[in-house]
Image (tube, grey):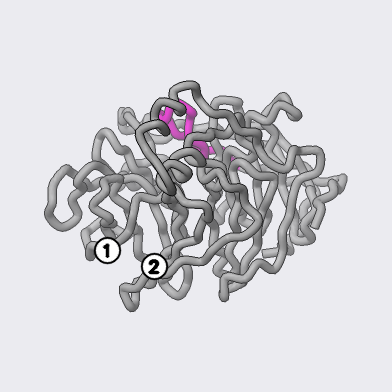
């Protein structure tokens, strides 16, 4: 389905606030930021090995985390987050394939999950299925589904992607009101909507953007590939191609059910626009974010959150709507 623009609706951002500044807190390497149903903000800092909880009013409420092998500890550091109801799942960036589960109220440790590889993105469904995006150097890309109730893992293959695994990275959102999954591909002009059976029910794209990023292979790749042979050499060959630019750098679901899509370093655009898609799959507005910030989340009260590209600062904005209806697609 091609998305066409509509007129008469606009979005403006105001009240920019740097998170943590009221508590003289300086982040080192922010890996993820998520909000919960109450509007509280959770941030993982890899270098500090901390998970922070802030109120919407930018007050530090709680923090946890340290290096170790015990309950609630991290072997390397906290990275990707998934939040639903009273649970926050924090994936360890180590290769130990573990994730820690905390209570959102006070960040108290609840349990440890196993067999979970470090993931680029994650989301938690109403059935307590943890949706994950991570890659092995293989031809296909999968949506990985970890069932927290039965401690089981299965993978859903995704179709119509290239043979280059580094291009197949996507952000994941779960819409609890409709039990739908939204996949936003970073290096494709593609947004997939899946039902609860993981079937693609709609595929969207933005007009006037390329279908996907071009790829390039560094000069050093040839030397690396020469150390392998047979099937493994072919796998390393495919993995040695890198995307030239991002189509969508950041995305989020708005409080009215609109999907926000922030374009990346697309040559055809020349600037980083954020598109807003309404319930009919149409572009209802565009606006600009600072070029060096990445859109990461929007809470139910209409506050938008970004992370600076240097990963050491996070910001909060108030979204001001003009001409929008109260109904939403999702």
The image quadrant that residue 268 belongs to is top right
Q: Is residue 34 visible?
A: no
Q: Residues within 10 Å of mark 2 (few under 14, many from 20)?
A: many
Snapshot quadrant of residue 292:
top right
Query: Residue at coordinates 26% horizontally, 48% vertically from top-left?
Result: 95
Question: What numbered label is drawn on residue 146?
Answer: 2
x, y percent for residue 100: 26, 57
Helix or strand or loop: what does disc 1 sit on? strand
Residue at numbered disc 1: 113
Residue 41 position within the rendered picture, expressed as x and y whole percent measured from the top left: 41, 48
Q: CA distance from mark 1 to mark 2?
A: 10 Å
Q: Is residue 325 above or below residue 243?
A: below
Q: Which residues are magenta?
A: 305-318
Q: Is residue 309 magenta?
A: yes
What residue lies at 35% left-to-right and 63% top-to-bottom? Answer: 87
Is 318 above or below relative to 279?
above
In screen coordinates, is 38 left or right of 161? Answer: left
Q: Quadrant of the C terminus?
A: bottom right
The reply, left or right, for residue 99 in relation to residue 135 is left
Q: Secondary structure at mark 2?
A: strand
């Amino acid at each position: 389905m091609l998305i066409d623009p509509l007129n008469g609706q606009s979005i403006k951002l105001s009240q920019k606030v740097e998170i943590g500044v009221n508590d003289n807190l300086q982040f080192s390497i922010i890996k993820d930021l998520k909000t919960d149903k109450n509007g509280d903000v959770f941030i993982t800092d890899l270098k500090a090995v901390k998970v922070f909880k802030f109120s919407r009013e930018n007050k530090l409420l709680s923090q946890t985390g340290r290096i170790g092998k015990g309950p609630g500890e991290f072997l390397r550091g906290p990275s990707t987050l998934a939040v639903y109801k009273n649970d926050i799942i924090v994936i360890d960036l180590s290769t130990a394939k573990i994730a820690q589960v905390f209570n959102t109220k006070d960040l108290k440790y609840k349990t440890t999950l196993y067999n979970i590889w470090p993931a680029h993105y994650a989301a938690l469904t109403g059935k307590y299925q943890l949706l994950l995006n991570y890659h092995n150097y293989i031809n296909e890309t999968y949506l990985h589904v970890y069932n927290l109730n039965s401690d089981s893992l299965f993978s859903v293959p995704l179709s119509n992607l290239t043979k280059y695994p580094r291009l197949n990275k996507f952000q994941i959102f779960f819409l609890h009101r409709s039990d739908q999954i939204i996949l936003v591909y970073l290096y494709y002009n593609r947004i997939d909507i899946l039902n609860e059976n993981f079937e693609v029910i709609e595929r969207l794209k933005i007009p006037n953007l390329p279908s996907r990023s071009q790829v390039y292979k560094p000069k050093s790749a040839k030397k690396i590939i020469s150390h392998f042979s047979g099937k493994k050499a072919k796998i390393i060959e495919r993995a040695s191609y890198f995307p030239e630019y991002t189509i969508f750098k950041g995305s989020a679901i708005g409080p009215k059910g609109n999907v926000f899509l922030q374009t990346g370093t697309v040559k055809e655009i020349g600037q980083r626009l954020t598109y807003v898609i309404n319930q009919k799959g149409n572009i209802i507005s565009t606006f600009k974010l600072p070029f060096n910030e990445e859109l990461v989340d929007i809470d139910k009260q209409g506050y938008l959150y970004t992370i600076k590209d240097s990963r050491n600062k996070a910001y909060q904005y108030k979204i001001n709507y003009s001409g929008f209806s109260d109904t939403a697609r999702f």
